[in-house]
Image (cartoon, helix red, strand yellow):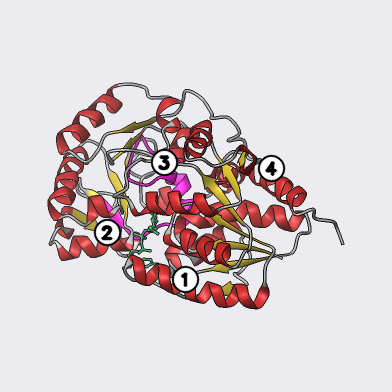
Amino acid sequence: MIFLVAGARPNFMKIAPLASELKKANMEHKIIHTGQHYDIQMSEAFFKDLGIPEPDISLGVGSGTHAEQTGRVMIEFEKVCRQERPELIVVVGDVNSTIACALVASKLSIPVAHVEAGLRSFDRTMPEEINRLLTDQISDFLFTTCEDANINLKNEGIPDNKIFFVGNVMIDTLLKQVELAKQSEILEKLRLKERGVVKDFGLLTLHRPSNVDNATILEGILNVILDFSKQIPVIFPLHPRTLKQLGRFGLICMVKYHEDISSVMKKESRNIIGIPPLGYLDFQCLLAHARLVLTDSGGIQEETTILGIPCLTLRNNTERPITVREGTNIVVGNDPLEIKNNIRHVMDKDASRLAVPKYWDGKAAERIVGIIKTKLNYKEA
Ligand code: UD1
């Protein structure tokens, strides 16, 4: 029995291809949802869009401080592990659920596989960096997306025989869903077609505490983007944390927020158009059509690289430098002048795709499941 663990939005597109390959290989597994993300749009919508089977076990931990959330996942996950004694647990990414479940399993002597191991921003003020470092130290199988990750792990003393360079499961999902995403009606719903800007709009996402938990920084970023939105429309799907902070800081007036996207007008005044979080297919459709993406997400840096869409990362660093070297990503930080200059730079030139990183080919999950099968000495019943 293998446990496949997911908790937060960026985990779901990573477990989708793993669940499907485990099923294909006829390997007994259960999907465990920790409940770190619980809103329909942050969780259920992704299971539906990606055809992931319903979770076998839901821990229902919800939000809280880091200690509360991590602690609650650990307490609930330990009960399940003690009862079911899985042979292996698979965790993905770098969220609180990732470290919490890895820590529980490792103390119960259950082997841990970490998918997307070895990424490093070298910024320990990021909660995700702590989660990555610790998860990798206690994992038995470290599946990596790029050479940088292999080097980082070796530098941290992880033995070679634990590291497996397999590629990027998130890109497995993107490539698999590309045709379905084309059928999304989001361009019509947001009236981008009617306005004749199907390939001429900006897409903004923000949720990092370093950007949205500080009123001055958040206002600075939004000011520049508001200015940019006079040139082309900017769509801003809002993470619940960001919506909450905009309200708290009295900055919601900087965004024309539509709780229901059917109220977006054809003649929407030139503004940042805020909407609720989108499902996977709608978001991929917008990504693929955007003229420019501005984000502080990790995964979007990789998706824009594969789609060949220019991406400005509004952070001071990235744990995914391959997207800068080989892809379309520029790390610009959150200083308003830097953002402004880089927007101008990207709008002035054709920032088309340079390359597809090695093994970002849609077969990462197949490789991972193949390795797990061999390592667990799995025999078909
Ligand atoms: C988490 C991850 C981050 C990831 C992000 C993607 C950690 C440390 N952070 O950050 O790496 O990029 O998910 O979204 O694990 N909320 C809701 N509904 C939900 C989920 C959250 O309203 O379904 C609100 C709650 O007010 C919550 C806040 O958003 O307090 C933050 O959620 P949380 O899971 O703590 O962290 P994220 O910012 O989402």
Which one is in front in this view, the residue at disc 4 or the one at disc 2? 4
User: In terms of sequence position, does the residue under pointer 3 or pointer 1 come before the other?
Assistant: 1
Q: Secondary structure at mark 1?
A: helix
Count neighbours of disc 3 (C-alpha within 10 A) and say few if under 14, some if 14 to 19, many if 20 or more.
many
**Badge 3 is on which residue?**
120
Q: Secondary structure at mark 2?
A: helix
- Disc 4/disc 2 C-alpha distance (Å): 37 Å
- Snapshot quadrant of residue 277: bottom left
Can residue 179 be seen from the camera position used here?
no
**Badge 4 is on which residue?**
367
User: In terms of sequence position, does the residue under pointer 3 or pointer 4 come before the other?
Assistant: 3
Residue 28 or residue 228, whichever sits in front: 28
Which one is in front in this view, the residue at disc 2 or the one at disc 3? 3
Count neighbours of disc 4 (C-alpha within 10 A) and say few if under 14, some if 14 to 19, many if 20 or more.
some
Provide the residue span drawn in magenta.
Answer: 273-300
**Badge 2 is on which residue?**
242
User: In terms of sequence position, does the residue under pointer 2 or pointer 3 come before the other?
Assistant: 3
Residue 314 percent coordinates (x, y):
28, 41
Residue 114 percent coordinates (x, y):
56, 51
Count neighbours of disc 1 (C-alpha within 10 A) and say few if under 14, some if 14 to 19, many if 20 or more.
many
**Badge 1 is on which residue?**
73
| Residue 191 as seen in the image, left or right of residue 369 | left
- Disc 4/disc 1 C-alpha distance (Å): 29 Å
| Mark 4 CB within 8 Å of ligand 1 | no
Residue 71 percent coordinates (x, y):
42, 71
- Disc 3/disc 4 C-alpha distance (Å): 23 Å
